[in-house]
Image (cartoon, rainbow, N blue to C red):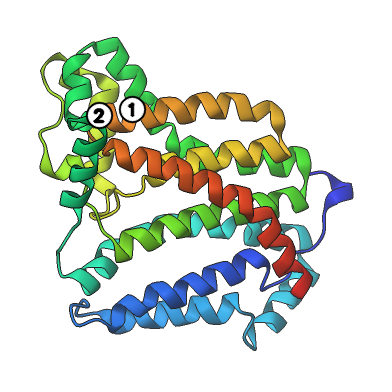
Amino acid sequence: MPQSDFTPRRLAEPVDRLLAAYAVVAGAALLFPHRPAHWPIFVLVHLAVAAIGFGTRPFPRVWNALVRRWPRAVSMVGDFLPIVLVPFLYAELPALNLSVWNGRYFDAAIQKVEMAVFGAQPSVELARALPILPLSEVLHAAYLSYYVIIVVPPLLIAWRAGTNALRNGVFALMLTFLVHYMFFIWFPVQGPRYLFTAPGGALAGGTVYRLAHTILEAGSSQGSAFPSSHVGVAVAQTVIAWRWLRPLAFPLGILAIGLAVGAVYGGFHYATDAIAGAVLGGAAAGIAPALYRRRAERQ
């Protein structure tokens, strides 16, 4: 990270307040009657995230003492911690949407949109129309690039553009994630992977195909299909890179397109999911700088 750009990180940065607000709104799902048996633990965790994020005493005093002692190390941990929390926020989504809807999903509504717009179900028909193993492997690889797209751009932005760019970028990224997660809680959609047969035949023998399906079987959260956060995050990271690290934007844009097509081709998402994710990701990343400035000015 450029030495000249470094500024110690405060608690209750805009991204911290964003996470705190999400913890409150998402935690409201636990007020519904179908909450899990261990719901008090969820409530305590959400309250703790909200208290820390809003800078409730005594957390700022503890944080400031740590920053004074190890300013760069503690600041770096704090700047990347929101990204580290993403898998945990994702993992709790089924418990939250089940609390509200008790296993009801809105796939039928999305499938109706698919038929009205495309006259078919692209998540089924695309792979059937193009059962080409090399194409399948490339598109599944593009879909898996999502995990690289999350992590690598913030690291490069921190290294090349400094703390201000990093904090702006992480805020935009987390805004994208959390807006998608709100949909997953309050309007859960399973996606075609749960309802339709996956592309088979020769495609199923592909190494990258098998890897993609293995990862999803191990860590997918039911009800998190619409809008596609994979596509939304890829588009958002492209917008963020265009602002802070422009040479990275073009390859990210290519990956985002491949990822969106791969999400539908592989039967992981409805085409509507991918389109909505792209729009939502672009919009979130587009408005994030103004929101960040407004929240930063209030501190």
The label number, if any, that marks residue 266 in the structure image: 2
- Residue furthest out toward the bottom: 57
Q: Amino acid at mark 2?
A: Gly
Task: Return the x and y of residue 229 as percentages of the image width and height.
Answer: 40, 47
- Left or right, 197 with respect to 291, comes to left
Question: Looking at the image, which residue is at 47% across and 43% down?
Answer: 279
Q: Is residue 283 visible?
A: yes
283 or 268, nearer to the observer: 283
Question: Looking at the image, which residue is at 45% across and 78% down?
Answer: 24
Report how many numbered discs are placed on residues in the image: 2
Q: Quadrant of the C terminus?
A: bottom right
Classify 180 as above or below 14.
Answer: above
Q: Is residue 299 visible?
A: no
The label number, if any, that marks residue 262 in the structure image: 1
Q: Quadrant of the N terminus?
A: top right
286 or 193, nearer to the observer: 286
- Left or right, 198 with respect to 63, comes to left
* Label 2, residues with CA under 10 Å away: few <14, some 14-19, many ≥20: many
- Left or right, 174 with respect to 95, comes to right
Q: Amino acid at mark 1?
A: Gly
* Residue contact between numbered discs 2 and 1, judged by CB atoms under 8 Å: yes
Question: Looking at the image, which residue is at 17% across and 29% down?
Answer: 124
Classify 259 as above or below 284.
Answer: above
Estimate the spatial distance between the alpha carbons at disc 2 and disc 1, rounded to whole Å.
6 Å
